[in-house]
Amino acid sequence: APAKIRAAILSAREQGYATIKDELDYGIVSVAVPIRGDGDEVVASINCSTATSRVDLEEMVETRLPHLRQAAREIEIELQRYPALVHSIRSASEQ
């Protein structure tokens, strides 16, 4: 399993997004993008999930990924405007 996880991380880094299908729960498809703080550090992520009966993985990427990327950019702008938010994110993830 560690090799599979490592491959998934490398793929997500190369593509700039991650996808899953039937991994968290059967019949669920999801796409996620990183949210970056200062210095290109990934501080969080944002995702969209739905049932595979509604869309397949390819359609999910095609239709949801542009919106997720735009939302991530908007969040990153706010994190630049309010750096204390990054501290709050880090504190919450350490608990």
Image: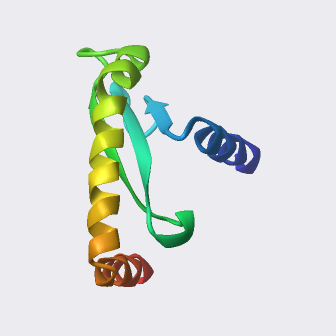
Write down the quadrant of residue 14 in the picture. top right
Of residues 34 and 82, which is closer to you in this image? 82
> Does residue 7 appear to the left or right of 24 in the view shown?
right
In the rendered image of this protein, does residue 37 appear above or below residue 68? below
Write down the quadrant of residue 52 in the picture. top left
Q: Which colour scheme is used?
A: rainbow
Residue positioned 34% across, 71% down in the render: 80
Quadrant placement of the C terminus: bottom left
Q: Position of residue 34 (x, y in %)?
A: 45, 52
Q: Count the numbered circles shown.
A: 0
Residue positioned 62% across, 45% down in the render: 13
Residue positioned 54% across, 41% down in the render: 16
In the rendered image of this protein, does residue 31 appear above or below residue 86? above
Of residues 80 and 85, which is closer to you in this image? 80
Of residues 91 and 77, which is closer to you in this image? 77
Write down the quadrant of residue 36 in the picture. bottom left
Residue positioned 48% across, 71% down in the render: 38
